[in-house]
Every structure is written in C-alpha cells, then in structure tokens.
Image: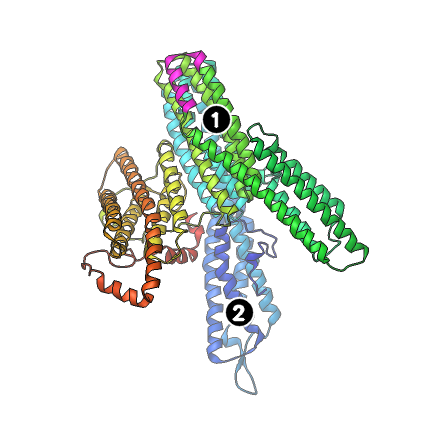
C-alpha cells in the first residue's frame, strides 16, 4: 500500500490508467497517503510529528471534498454516468472522512508511561480507508476520462455527417457553405484528438493517433480541391476517382482515431505488427544470452527455428531489385556466419548438457559471444542498407522531376506524356514503399515501426492520386481548379518526403543510442509577462485551410529544431551558454511547429505571438553570449561570428517588432502568423550555421588554454577583458524569468484535467 499504484496501472477497482493527466492527478494523493501509512510503523509520536500527520490527514479530506464536488457536477451534466459517478464520489467522500477522523488529534489517547499521544489505533481501518480512497478517486477520474472520449466520438460523428453532405453536394454554393462548417468541425476534432494524443501513456497508441491525425490534416486540403474539381468537371472519371479516394481515406482515418480512444477490438494495437528483423534479432540474442544462467531455458530446436525465421526476414533485403550485388553478398555472408556461430554454440551447449553442467561452460561462453557479435553485425549491415537506400532516394526525390514533368504535361493537355511520367512516378512510389518496409525492419522501436507503416501506406495511396489529378488536368488543361488540385497532391507527396527525412533521423538516433523520442517542449511564455501590448488582441485558432497551408513551413521548423538538437549534442560542454540558449530556441521552435499542426501547448494565435516574443528575447541573449565568446577569437574568426551574430540580432528584433504589432481581421492575423514563423525559420537557420563553427573554435581555444595555464587563470583574464554591458541590455541569464526546466517542474504540478 505504501508503494505508488501508478507504476502498476491497476488499482483494486481493476481500472487501468491510460492517460498521463489521470496519473499526474493521482500522484500527490498517493504521496500523502504513503506518508500516513509509513508513519504507522511508530505508533507513538511527538507533538510536532502528530501535528504534521494531522495536517496531512485534514489536507487529504479537504482535497477529496473539492474533488468530489467536481465529480458530482460532472455526474449532473452527464446523466449516463450519474449512478456510477455518484457511487464513486460517495465512496471517496466516506474514505476521506475516515482518514480525517483517524488522524484527528482530539480522538487520540495519551500514553500512560510517557504522556505521548498514540494515533492510528485502528491500523486495519487506516489501510482500508486508504485503499477505498485510491480506488474510488481513480474510478472518478476514469469516469471523467470517459467524458473526454465521449467528446471525441461526438466530434467525429459531426464530422462524418458533414462529410456525407459534402460528398453529395451538386452546386458550388452549397459546397462552400458546408465546407465552412466542415472546416470548423475538423479544427475542433483536431484539438480534441491532439490533446488526447499528448495525454496517452502508451507510445504505440500515440504513434497510431499521430498517423491518423496526419492523414486527416493532409486530406482536408485534398478534399477541398478534389471536390471542387469534381463539381467543375462532373463527367470526368479521373476527377471522380480522385475525389472518392480522398473521402475513403478520411473515413478510414476517422475510424482509426475512434478505435484508439475506445480501444475497440479492431484497433490497430490488436493487429499484429509485421515481424521486424530488429525484434527478431533482439529476441534471438536474449534467448542465447539466457543460456548463460540456465542451460535448459530453451531447446536447441527453438533456437534453430528463431534463427531461420530471422534469416527468412532478410529476404526482404536480398530479394529486392534495388539492393546492389555487393550489399546482397554482404547480407548473405553475414547470415551464413550467424548460422555457423549458432551451430558451434549448439555443439558446445549439447556437450555441456551431456556432462550435467549447471551453467555455461567456457566453450559455451565463447560461442555465445561470437553468436551475439555476428547477429549484431548482421543488424548493422541491414541498418546501413536500409538507411543508405532511404538517404539516396530522398536526394533523388528532392529534385521532384516526375512531379514537375507531370504538372507541365497536364498543363499542355498531353495525355501521352502524362502516361509516360506516371509510369516514372509509379516506379519511384514502389521504391519508396519498399524502402519504408526495410526501414520498418530496422527502426528499433514499435512507435517508429508504426510510423514507417504509415509512411508506406501514404506513398502507396498518394502516388495514384497524383496520377488521377494529372489525368484530369490533361483532359482540362485550361482548368485553374484542376491545376490547383494537382498542386495540392504534389505538396502532400513532398510533405511526406519531409516526414520520411525526420523518420530517418529518428531511426538513426535509436541505432546510435541517442534519445529515441523527442523531449517534451514546455517553453511557454510566463503568463502576464508579454500581454500588456496585446490586451485588445483576439485569441483565435487557425482554421483547417490555414493549418494546411502552414504545414510545409511547420515541417521546416521541425527539421531545423532537430538539426539544432543534433549540433548541440556534439558540444562537450553541455552547460555552455551558447548550447543552453540554442536548445531553448530549438524547444520554442518545436512548439511553433506543433502549433501549425493544431497540437501542443500553443493553442491560439495569441499564444504563438507570446512565444515569438520569448523566442526573440532568448535569441538576443544568445547574441550577447556570442559577443562574449568572440572576445577570445582572432580577427578572421571574430569577423565570421560577428557577421552571423548581426544577422541574428536583426532577425530577433524583426520577430519582436512583428509579434508586438497589433493587427485586426482574419487575413492580417494569418499574415502575422506566417511572418512570425518565417522569421523564426531564419533565426534557426543562422543558429544552425553558427553552432558547428563555434564548437570547433571552443575546442581549439580550450586546448590552447589547457596548455597555457589553469582554467582559473584564464577565466580571470577573460573577466578582465570582457566589456561591461549597459544596464539596458539583456544581461540577465533568462530575461523572461521562466526557463524550460522551471516550467517543466511547474507543469508537472498542474492538474491537466482542468483543460478538459
């Protein structure tokens, strides 16, 4: 009972905690109850200890009272949960009252020997009350969580109804009217599911939710142009095929979201992921290494079957028409080596069993090491092949030659050329689909496997959609809407290529032992700090069309923030001001990227402009650090740093001025958002060019300092040579007074259910 049940996920009530908000709400209560239970070990207490216990007991009771009041209000608003919620609230209140009574000083009796007060005379009652409180509070939270799920389902149902209406419209006027409603409903659904995705504990569910939401995000704009094209050219078969494919994909994605939040049996989690080579190697090595402790932990037949299944999966690499002869031979040779080493292990293993050895013999130990090494070498080679293939393809596709050719041929009305370039695009699509399958084999984590599968499906679907859009344009070369439609599908293809580049980087991070998941970015501006000049501004959310047009720019921000993270990891001095401030800029930029997707902590345009102000301040702080850093440099080096720093100052001031300038109207607000993100991109581009150069110089001068004198002596010389800054400059360590770490601590204490 003294241990936190949150680690277990299951309480006495049998309710599983699936979201972080529920878990975080329970942690303080668990901590308080643990304090009470632990104090039971010494029944005689001093007055000071007794007073502390009394305060904890009363605090629990008061907190439960407030908590129950919220639960009862939820029950009143949701009649279908009224009985269950009412019972859970009743049990929670009863348990809270029992704990208050058991920790009441007035009810405790003084000891006859030393006069000290004895509390918790009813140990069984305290444990029972604590268990009842935790299980009932958990039940209230889980029931409240059902309301969130209900909101998502209701939102999905509204979207589906409007989607049906959109599919059946026959006039432009009716379409525009219904699409406006659809856009608002999609924004609401995006925010609800974005919050849910961030709240989920299960990383696989989060990855599936992200994939489904990405489909909906990209398909919203496709649906707009595909429907308009179909309305403009109602007798065009390729336009109808194009439109039908978008509607079908959106419905599948909507269904997938609901399967995840309701945990329906058809949910992707219950579908077995394709067997990856990474998992096969991991299981094989684990089984082989277990033989050290227990010679009978598995049979030789099972080891042999595991190995053969593993080798069979490598056929996805060796059978590929795109694998070079040298790569194929290297993989086959390593497979053969693994077989040989495993056979030697088998002989040593059987021999050890024949002499009734209790643990692995020396021969066995050597064979285990060789087998594990050879299978690791196989994994390394497969990783190299998959990642190399993906990198090469991304370079080729970066030029977008087939897409440009299709657009040109369609605009000329040249159906033969469209057919020719369609074959080229189809071949590229097949290469990308196969490469995603190979990346899935070596991805290293189940969430990344899910992302690989999503990428594979996306290329598989969008390729034919681009071709049907190009055919429509070729049939109607003067149609502006047909041309716009093809552009939208081509942009979706390019966007997926950007996603694939990020996926590739994450797979490499896992393989090389760096973090596999993006850290949580919580660098929101301090409330009230920057709001003086924006009091009259209206906080609005981007609509679906605006989010779509921001998607490509947002992806560029994500790539840049990831690149900055990679560069700062190369610094030996992780506490260096340049490193710390660059990391902070990357964090805030990632927040702005999430905003373009309708996710994260920045919910409205006002949040974004606040974040832009904080980012500009941090950028100016970085300029101050760069100026100090440059004092140790020689003229040529100093000139390079100062030139880039001046660019950075200008961009930060531009961002700050733009963020503070009030605007009115939807168009002006959107332009201000676009400008803020464009300028932020410029800031990170400059930072990215400075980081490797400064790191190189820092290592150089650090080496020189170590040979010239002690760091202390050097620091004194540096302090003497550093010019004194004006009082008005940004010379505090963090001008906004709210660093990333302190904000993370602050956020950890919040009840995230309040936002729901």
Q: CA distance from mark 1 to mark 2?
A: 59 Å
Q: Earlier in the sequence, mark 1 or mark 2?
A: 2
Residue at label 1? 462
Is residue 409 found inside the magenta-colored segment of the image?
A: yes
Of the 4 image quadrants, the one containing the N terminus is bottom right
Residue 258 relative to residue 533: left or right: right
* Residue stretch rendered in magenta on the structure: 401-417
Q: Secondary structure at mark 1?
A: helix
Query: Residue 264 colored magenta?
Result: no
x, y percent for residue 104: 50, 73
Residue that appears at 42% across and 58% down: 749
Within-10-Å neighbours for mark 2: few <14, some 14–19, many 20+ = many
* Residue at x 65%, y 52% (from the top left corner): 369
In the visual, does 100 lie left or right of 315?
left
Which is in the foreground here, disc 1 or disc 2? 1
Where 412 sits versus 591, above or below? above
> Residue 106: x, y in percent?
50, 76
- At a point 61% along the width and 32% down the height, the residue shown is 318
Q: Which residue is mark 2?
A: 36
Residue at 37% across, 58% down: 575
- As drawn, which residue projects farthest toward the front? 707
- Crowding near the residue tagged with mark 1, few <14, some 14–19, many ≥20 C-alpha atoms within 10 Å: many
Q: Nearer the viewer, residue 79 or 700?
A: 700
Viewer-proximal residue, 115 or 84? 115
């Amino acid at each position: 009972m003294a241990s936190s049940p949150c680690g277990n996920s299951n309480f006495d009530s049998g309710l599983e905690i699936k979201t972080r908000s529920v878990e975080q709400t329970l942690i303080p209560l668990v901590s308080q109850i643990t304090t009470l239970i632990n104090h039971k070990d010494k029944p005689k207490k001093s007055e000071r200890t007794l007073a502390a216990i009394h305060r904890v007991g009363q605090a629990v009771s008061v907190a439960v009272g407030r908590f129950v009041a919220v639960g009862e209000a939820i029950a009143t608003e949701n009649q279908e949960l009224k009985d269950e919620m009412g019972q859970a609230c009743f049990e929670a209140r009863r348990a809270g009252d029992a704990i208050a009574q058991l920790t009441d000083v007035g009810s405790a009796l003084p000891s006859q020997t030393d006069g000290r007060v004895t509390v918790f005379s009813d140990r069984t009652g305290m444990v029972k009350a604590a268990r009842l409180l935790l299980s009932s509070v958990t039940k209230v939270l889980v029931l409240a969580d059902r309301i969130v799920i209900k909101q998502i389902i209701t939102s999905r149902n509204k979207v589906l109804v409007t989607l049906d209406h959109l599919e059946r419209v026959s006039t432009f006027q009716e379409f525009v009217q219904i699409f406006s409603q659809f856009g608002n409903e999609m924004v609401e659904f995006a925010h609800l599911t974005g919050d849910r995705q961030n709240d989920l504990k299960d990383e696989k569910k989060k990855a599936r939710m992200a994939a489904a939401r990405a489909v909906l995000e990209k398909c919203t704009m496709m649906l707009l142009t595909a429907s308009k094209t179909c309305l403009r050219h109602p007798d065009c078969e390729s336009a109808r095929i194009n439109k039908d494919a978008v509607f079908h994909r959106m419905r599948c994605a909507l269904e997938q979201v609901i399967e995840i939040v309701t945990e329906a049996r058809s949910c992707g989690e219950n579908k077995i992921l394709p067997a990856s080579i990474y998992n096969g190697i991991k299981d094989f090595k684990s089984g082989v290494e277990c033989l050290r402790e227990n010679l009978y932990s598995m049979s030789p037949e099972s080891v042999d079957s595991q190995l053969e299944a593993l080798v069979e999966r490598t056929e996805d690499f060796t059978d590929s028409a795109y694998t070079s002869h040298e790569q194929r031979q290297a993989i086959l040779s390593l497979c053969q080596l693994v077989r040989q080493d495993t056979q030697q292990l088998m002989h040593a293993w059987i021999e050890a069993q024949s002499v009734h050895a209790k643990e692995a013999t020396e021969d066995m130990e050597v064979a285990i090491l060789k087998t594990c090494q050879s299978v690791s070498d196989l994994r390394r080679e497969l990783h190299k092949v998959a990642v190399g293939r993906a990198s090469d393809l991304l370079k080729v596709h970066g030029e977008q030659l087939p897409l440009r050719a299709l657009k040109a041929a369609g605009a000329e009305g040249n159906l033969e050329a469209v057919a020719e370039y369609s074959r080229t695009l189809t071949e590229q699509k097949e290469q990308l689909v196969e490469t995603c399958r190979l990346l899935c084999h070596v991805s290293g984590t189940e969430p990344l496997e899910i992302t690989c599968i999503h990428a594979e499906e996306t290329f598989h679907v969008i390729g034919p959609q681009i071709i049907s859009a190009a055919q429509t344009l070729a049939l109607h070369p003067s149609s502006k809407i047909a041309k716009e439609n093809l552009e939208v599908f081509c942009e979706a293809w390019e966007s997926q290529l950007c996603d694939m580049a990020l996926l590739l980087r994450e797979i490499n991070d896992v393989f090389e032992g760096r973090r596999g998941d993006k850290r949580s970015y919580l660098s929101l501006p301090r409330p009230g700090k920057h709001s003086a000049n924006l009091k009259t501004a209206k906080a609005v959310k981007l609509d679906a069309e605006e989010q779509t047009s921001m998607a490509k720019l947002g992806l560029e921000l994500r790539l840049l923030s990831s690149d900055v993270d990679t560069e700062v990891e190369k610094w030996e001095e992780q506490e260096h001001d340049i490193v710390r401030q660059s990391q902070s800029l990357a964090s805030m930029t990632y927040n702005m990227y999430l905003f373009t997707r309708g996710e994260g902590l920045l919910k409205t345009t006002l949040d974004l402009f606040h974040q832009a102000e904080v980012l500009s301040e941090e950028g100016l702080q970085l300029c101050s650090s760069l100026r100090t850093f440059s004092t140790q440099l020689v003229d040529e080096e100093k000139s390079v740093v100062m030139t880039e720093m001046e660019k950075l100052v200008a961009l930060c001031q531009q961002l700050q001025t733009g963020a503070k300038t009030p605007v009115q109207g939807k168009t002006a607000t959107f332009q201000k958002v676009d400008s803020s993100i464009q300028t932020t991109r410029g800031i990170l581009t400059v930072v990215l060019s400075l980081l490797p150069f400064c790191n190189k110089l820092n290592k150089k001068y650090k080496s020189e300092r170590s040979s010239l004198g002690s760091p202390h002596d050097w620091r004194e010389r540096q302090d003497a040579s550093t010019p004194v800054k004006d009082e008005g400059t940004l010379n505090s360590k963090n001008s906004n007074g709210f660093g990333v770490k302190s904000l993370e601590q602050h956020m950890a204490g919040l009840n995230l259910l309040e936002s729901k």
